Image (cartoon, rainbow, N blue to C red):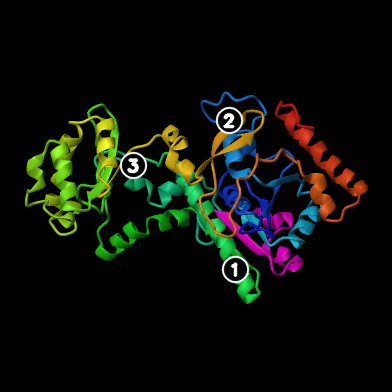
Amino acid sequence: MTEPLTGMRIIEMATALQGPAAGGYLAEMGADVIRVETPGGDGSRYGRGVNNTNPPGTAGTQFASTSRGKRSISIDAKSEAGLEVIHRLLETADAFISNYREAALERLGLGYEACRERNPGLVYALANGFGPHGPKATRPMTDIAAQARGGLMSMIGEADGAPMRAGVTVADLAGAMQLALATVTALLARERHGVGQKVNISAYGAQIWLQSWELNHAGLTGQTLERDGAHHPNVPGMEAIYETKDGGWMAISFAKTEPAWQALCEFGGIPNAATDERWNSVQKRVGMSTDPEIARSIRPVLAAAFRSRTTAEWEAFFDSQPQIIANRVFSHADVLSDPQARANGYITDVELPPIGTIPFVGPLIHFSETPPSVKGPPPELDQHAEEILRELGYSWDEITSITESSRTAMRERFEALGLDPPY
């Protein structure tokens, strides 16, 4: 079946998370994504993380998350033959994506001008840490550094405590989303206007974009918002995370109608709050039409109400109240087994050798006419080398020479690390 990006070929030379996650999205949408790896393979193949007791040889969780549905070829880009393979691949490609530093790509002979000379219509999409210009343009980046410089970290944590990082790789993955969006936007521009081009995004810029409202508010008012723990710094009313009687947590935004608000107050044992003139409208309870301090005064009242009932009792109550926007705070285990996630295909089953069937994040976008499919396991290192080289017109003798050279370099790198090479 035709998928949204069926017929598109993407060459990916990327490492870790930001670049590969963008390529993973494009592969999920049906593009032929060829992951060009170094002879040793990308380091994310081998990163096990914590609590990982899966058998040796199982793909690292980061690699498995970003590389399902891709094809792998291991190439020494520093060799003349290896560089020629990559150039031939680029001649067949719609887009090239990378999060290598641009100077490193230039040194390899894979800068934009060299690639455009071979393929004028190529979309050349780069992600870096801090953007293509400015004093930090060439500095390396990790997720924590982007969260820090982008200002996101300053908004996480208790008001009187230290700043905290988000507990997920939000900088890298926001950058990956921007890289995927930039790539498909440039591909559309090529279709409409007939031009290939270079596009740049950064994890730092993605953090700024994620905070557009809050940053623009600070710019407009001249006052910087301050972190406020379980509350949004620009929403002074009832919206928050509250602890329940048995130590669970419920997140609530607001009650959309007065009957719903009155039902919440009755259930939580705070009936007087239902008619208190300080909070007797949605606007007042949200904090849109009253003094911020008055709006904040509702919080301890609600905190006491939530502590009066168990998590299960509150969850059942909110299930019966469609006019109240609230939800139990889910753990990752909850999300993986959530029937709502399953119903939409957000969590699906994937075969991952040698483990078997496991729950995995699936395609998040629904298309009525060109639906994406759930892709299989991530590729073994260099799994598709012969297949890809044949497609490029290499003879069997040339393929043997190229693959043996690559695998010799691969064996040397693995042995230097004290590891058993895959070949």
**Rendered image quadrant of residue 244:** top left
| Residue in the foreground of this view, choosing between 336 and 193 | 336
The amino acid marked with disc number 1 is: Leu
Density class for disc 2 (Cα within 10 Å; few <14, some 14-19, many ≥20) is some
Task: Point out residue 177 in the picture as x, y percentages from the top left corner.
Answer: 52, 54
- Give me the C-alpha separation between circle 1 and circle 3: 40 Å
Tag 2: amino acid: Arg
Which residue type carries mark 3?
Pro
Q: CA distance from mark 2 to mark 3?
A: 28 Å
Q: Is residue 321 left or right of residue 145?
A: left
Q: Pinpoint residue 349: horizontal percent, then vertical percent.
A: 57, 37
Circle 1 — which element? helix
How many other residues sit within 10 Å of disc 3, few (<14), some (14-19) or many (≥20)?
some
Label at residue 163: 3
199 is within the stretch colored magenta: no
Disc with the residue nearer the chain's start (1 vs 3): 3
Q: Which mark is residue 48?
A: 2
Query: At 25% across and 54% down in the image, what residue appears?
Result: 234
Residue name at image x 58 percent, y 30 percent: 48
Residue named by callout 1: 188
The local secondary structure at tag 2 comes to: loop
Residue 222's quadrant in the figure? bottom left
Does residue 169 appear anywhere in the picture?
no
Mark 1 Cα-neighbour bin, 10 Å: few <14, some 14–19, many ≥20: some
Whole-percent x, y for residue 320 in the image: 26, 42
Q: How far is disc 1 from disc 2 in space, using C-alphas?
A: 38 Å
Q: Which residues are magenta?
A: 104-128
Q: Earlier in the sequence, mark 2 or mark 3?
A: 2
The answer to whether the residues at label 1 and label 2 have Cβ atoms under 8 Å apart is no
